[in-house]
Amino acid sequence: KIEVVEYSTSPEQFLKNCFLPAQVTAIEFDENDEGPVAHVEVRPEDRGIAIGKEGKNIFKAKKLALRQHNIADVMLVTDEAA
């Protein structure tokens, strides 16, 4: 199976594209020992879509973010206020 993710020079937009069709409500970046970490916030009802079956969507997002934007890790956060 081939999956296409639209590239963007903006790390924020690229991560949003990785998680489609889940709606990303916010993305924050911080640093750890390994480099930049993206905290991606999604609505509670989109959490399952963002993770994917057997974690394939979050795994894909982590691999692509590292390769395209040198982001060391991607962490999923649920937007509890939604």
Image: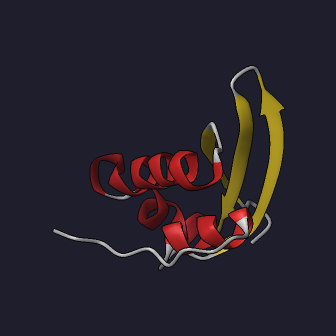
Q: Does residue 60 appear to the left or right of 74 in the view shown?
A: left
**Displayed quadrant of residue 57:** bottom left
From the viewer's perspective, tell me whether residue 47 is left or right of residue 42.
left
Q: Residue furthest top?
A: 33
Q: Residue at x 29, y 56 (%)?
A: 53
On screen, residue 20 above or below 66: below
> In front: 64, or 20?
64
Q: Quadrant of the N terminus?
A: bottom left
> What is the residue that sits farthest to the left in this orientation?
1
Residue 31 in the image, given as x and y percentages of width and height? 82, 33
Residue at horizontal 52%, vertical 61%?
47
State the quadrant of the C terminus: bottom right
Q: Residue at x 48, y 62 (%)?
A: 50
Quarter of the image for residue 30 reads: top right
Q: Position of residue 45 (x, y in %)?
A: 54, 70
Residue 78 drawn at (x, y percent): 66, 56
Along the line of sight, which residue is nearer the eye, 12 or 77? Answer: 12
The vertical placement of 59 against 50, above or below, is above
Q: Residue at x 51, y 68 (%)?
A: 19
Is 25 situated above or below 69? below
Where 1 falls versus 80 (above or below)?
A: below
